[in-house]
């Protein structure tokens, strides 16, 4: 009896710590750097969102624009969904600069993107305008820590980014 309990305990311990091989998972491709994601995906999506609704007052008076057609709204949904889902790409191995603040800041961007997506689904132009700031704040929060104020612009962690 004694020995068999010992064996069971040893087996359990081994199951917890003997696995040296990384768990199998989908073959995610993460060669695209944070910088490339920013420049080619996150930033263009944010621009689409920020430019979707606006008002300019000039000598011709007040000019307001907002999405009108179904195609216009699709562009806004595309932008918002891209921002929300890009957060997952930022949290992937090779891209995440740490497992704490970086993750929280990415989640902040995901939340802001999802709120914008819901406003886009509701075709709520005012909501899109207001949430533009929420999205902007989520970008800035991360840039302040990992890019702008960082002497090496967030490249501190060696990851080839
Ligand atoms: C979780 C962190 C994080 C979030 C959130 C984030 N960024 Fe970035 N961003 C970075 C880092 C780090 C860099 C610097 C990358 C480098 O140069 O290696 C960067 C760089 C950039 C750049 C410069 C890209 C280039 O070509 O040099 C742009 C533009 C940018 N981000 C836009 C945005 C926008 C817009 C948002 C929000 C919608 C956003 N980012 C959200 C971390 C973040």
Image (cartoon, rainbow, N blue to C red):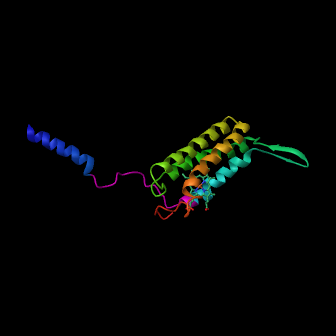
Does residue 109 appear to the left or right of 44 in the view shown?
left
Residue at 73% x, 46% y is 52
Camera-side residue of 145 and 53: 145
Does residue 23 appear to the left or right of 112 in the view shown?
left
Outermost residue, right direction?
Answer: 59
Outermost residue, top direction?
Answer: 122
- The quarter of the displayed image where residue 122 is located: top right
Say above or below: 157 vs 14: below
Camera-side residue of 75 and 86: 86
Q: Main secondary structure of the magenta part?
A: loop
Find residue 72 and report its horizontal and vertical position in percent: 73, 44
Residue at 25% x, 52% y is 18
Say above or below: 114 vs 159: above
As for residue 101 lying within the magenta part, the answer is no
As for residue 34 lying within the magenta part, the answer is yes
Find residue 102 and report its horizontal and vertical position in percent: 50, 51
Find residue 79 and report its horizontal and vertical position in percent: 65, 47
Quadrant of picture, ligand 1: bottom right
Q: Quadrant of the N terminus?
A: top left
Residue at 9% x, 42% y is 3
Total marks drawn?
A: 0
Find residue 101 and report its horizontal and vertical position in percent: 49, 49
Q: Which range of residues does the magenta coloring cover? A: 19-35
Camera-side residue of 1 and 146: 146
Does residue 20 appear to the left or right of 64 in the view shown?
left
- The quarter of the displayed image where residue 34 is located: bottom right
Residue at 57% x, 41% y is 111
């Amino acid at each position: 009896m004694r020995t068999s309990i010992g064996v069971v305990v040893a087996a359990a311990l081994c199951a917890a710590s003997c696995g040296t091989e990384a768990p199998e998972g989908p073959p995610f491709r993460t060669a695209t750097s944070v910088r490339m994601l920013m420049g080619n995906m996150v930033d263009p999506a944010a621009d689409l969102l920020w430019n979707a609704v606006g008002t300019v007052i000039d000598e011709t008076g007040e000019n307001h624009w907002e999405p009108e057609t179904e195609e216009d709204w699709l562009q806004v949904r595309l932008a918002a969904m891209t921002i929300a889902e890009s957060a997952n790409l930022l949290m992937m191995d090779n891209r995440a600069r740490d497992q704490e603040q970086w993750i929280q800041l990415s989640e902040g961007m995901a939340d802001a993107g999802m709120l914008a997506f819901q406003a886009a689904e509701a075709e709520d132009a005012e909501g899109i305008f207001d949430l533009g700031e929420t999205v902007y704040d989520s970008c800035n929060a991360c840039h302040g820590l990992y890019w702008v104020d960082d002497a090496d612009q967030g490249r501190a962690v060696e990851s080839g980014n």
